[in-house]
Each structure stands twice: as structure tokens, then as C-alpha cells.
Amino acid sequence: MTQATRQVLRQLATRFGIVGESPAMVQAASRLLQVAPTDLTILITGETGTGKEVFAHAAHELSTRKKHPFVSVNCGAIPETLLESELFGAEKGAFTGAVEQRKGFFEAAHRGTILLDEIGEMPIATQVKLLRVLESGEFSRLGSSDVTRVDVRVIAATNRDLLYEVRQGRFRQDLFFRLNSVNIHLPPLRQHIDDIPLLVEHFAERTADKTATIWQGIDGDAVEILKAHPWQGNIRELRNIVETMVTLEQGQRITAEMVLRYLPARTAEETQPAVGGLVRIPDPLADAPAAADVQMLYRTLLQLSTDVTEVKTVLRHLLAMSMEFQNAPDGSGSPTVTSTAVAPVRTSSAVGRPSLPSLNIAELERLAIEEALRSSHGNRREAARLLGISDRTLYRKLEEYGLDG
């Protein structure tokens, strides 16, 4: 990345709060800078909380319309029966409660910019009227046949896959093509986690200014925990957590312990959301067999935690059989069974594991964690994935058992 590019990105961060140096964010910022000075319609796509309204406001402020109104409309927050009148206005008596003529958002945004957020929620009937405005700048207030003309730049935003909505018959194809003159896609935070330190610094410094405190920075371990979080709420969720930590901790240096205390707990059913509200189903075949084995072992241990005796008995038999194979007197590897009773078996002293009869669930859990850390070469995030637990739980267990990972 050139020095000039970094300078532009710093200006975008300072002026609009657009923070990020990852390739995906650089691409989005470059597209913004290209299209903002024009009058082209923009379609901003991305999951909830990725900063779509921030980009829309920046596009307005970087355009020749910046001295005129910027009107933001959340189409999903307005009832379908009222959306048309809110957008285009209504005449007196047009519907029950319309006691006077009222201008709509398009008239309020004349010569400026209107953001139609959650455009995928707009009903078909209103889409027809919107298409007319995009094509000719003309519309009629509800209850009137008079034509009103406006000069408005339209920016649309959605967290839905509009092409999918078109195929399902819920969104007009002609309107989609008209809106999609220029598409700016904002990636979910989990796809550009290297931007998290910059985002934390930005939100923390801004919060410290508001609360008249001095922010003392963040530890590397704390950053790694933040990077491992799934961030289903994306940048908005990160901002809220950072603002809370900096405010309640009065600007103290953010540690791993603080982050774990403020991050919401993850659930086993947690999945990654996708644009359009579709959930990506993880492919079990994509995981390595070894990872599945470790994960299954750990979950089995947890499920059997109420029956320690059964776990010990099964492991004792398995270990006894293994030792008999290894210590066969004829060297053939075939065991010599001399008794049905199984004597207590101890693991190799070189490994340093406790003897089997003294094992309890906590020790088995510790062994599973140690095995996962070895398999992942000390990568805690990968170890948590192998064990099928959250990163937060793993960090707690490491501290509980005195493991340094």
C-alpha cells in the first residue's frame, strides 16, 4: 500500500469513521471515492452493522450535493401501508388521519441525497413508484394526480441478496438493474479481522474524548481474543463493546481478562450469517478427520461427566489392551491374555501424565486441551475449534489449569 493511499484512508477515518486497510476495505473505499462526485445511483450491500449508512453519508459529503439535505429512510421500519405516503407525501384526505397535505422524504431531499436503507423490505407496489422517480424524477403524492418533480440522488442499501429476491419474485428486476449502477460491497468483520486493531483504536480514542479520559491502549492477547470472536453484529458490535470497556474501565489499558468479561458468551449452535439472511451450513467433510476425533472426544467427556466410573473403566480396558499389544513377549504384537481382571495401568513416565486410577473428569479435560494445543502447534484459536468450544471458554480453561498454551 502506497503512502498516498494510507493518507487518504486516514482522512476517511478521521472525517467519516471509515476505518480499515484490508484489501476488501481499500477496494470499497476506492469505489466510494470514484463514484461520490458523480450523480450515479449507488447500491451498498453488506450484513447488518458493516457501515452501510456511514458509506452513504460519506458519498453525500464528497459530492456536489453536500450543501443540500441528506435524508435517511429505513424502509424496513415503516409499515407497508404508510411507506408510500412517507416517501412521496400525501394529500389531505388521502387516507384516514391525513388531515393536511404533507410532503414526503423525496421532496424533503430535493437537490440532495436520499438513502433508502433496507431497500429489500420495500413492497412491490412502492417499487413501481420508485422506479418512476429513478427514471424521470417524477411522482405523484398519494391521493393526487398532479406530477411533482424532484432532483434527488438515490443511494440504496440492503443486507439481502437482491438477485435472490428477484428470482423469488419479491423484488423487481428492472428496479434492481436501475439501482445497481454502482455496487459497493462491505465485507463482514470476520473477513477483515486484521482491521480490528485500527477499529479498536478509532472507537477507543473517540470514546476517551467524549468521556474526558486517556485511553492507555490494548494488549496483544486482548487483540487476539477480539480477532477470534465471530462478530455477528460486525463493526457495530465491536464499537459497542469497545465504547463500553473504555467507559466503564475509565480508559485503562484493555487486557485479555477485560475482553473476556465484556464479550458475550458464544453458543455451540452459533453459525455465520450471510448476505440475504441465508445461513451458511458448515461442511463436515471440510474438516480434517483428526479435528473431528479430538472434538468428538472432548464433547464425549463433557457428556459423560456425570459418570466418572464408566469413563475410567472404558479407558482402563483400552489402555490395558494397548499395553498388552506393545509388551507381547514374542514380539509379534499379539497379546497374551492371562486373566480377565485388568490391573491398573499407568501411562509412560516420559509423557508425565497421571496414573489412570487417579484420573477424574478435570484431568481428562486437561489432557484433551493439551492434546488439542499440541495438534494445533499452540494456536489457541485452532485448538478451540478442534475441541468444539468457544475461544472464551478455552482461555478460561487455560487459566483454570495453569496452561500457557
Image: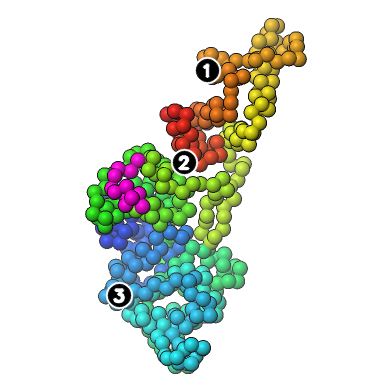
- At which x and y percent is residue 325? 68, 14
- At which x and y percent is residue 5? 28, 53
Residue in view at x 63 percent, y 15 percent: 345
Disc 3 element: loop
- At which x and y percent is residue 1? 31, 48
> Is residue 7 or residue 381 the one in the foreground?
381
Sequence order check, earlier mark of 2 and 3: 3
Single out the mark in the foreground, 3 or 1. 1
Label pair 1/2, CB-CB below 8 angstroms: no
User: Is 264 rendered above or below residue 103?
Assistant: above
Q: Is residue 192 left or right of residue 272?
A: left
The CA span between labels 1 and 2 is: 28 Å
Residue identifier under label 2: 392
Question: How many numbered markers are drawn?
Answer: 3
- At which x and y percent is residue 198? 32, 49
Q: Is residue 169 left or right of residue 335?
A: left
The CA span between labels 3 and 1 is: 71 Å
Q: Is residue 97 left or right of residue 168?
A: left
Residue in view at x 40 percent, y 80 percent: 105
Residue in view at x 64 percent, y 28 percent: 308
Give residue 65's mark.
3
For this orientation, the residue located farthest to the top is: 329
Q: Is 251 within the magenta?
A: yes
Q: Residues within 10 Å of mark 3 (few under 14, many from 20)?
A: many
Three-letter residue code for mark 1: Val
Name the image quarter holding the C terminus. Answer: top left
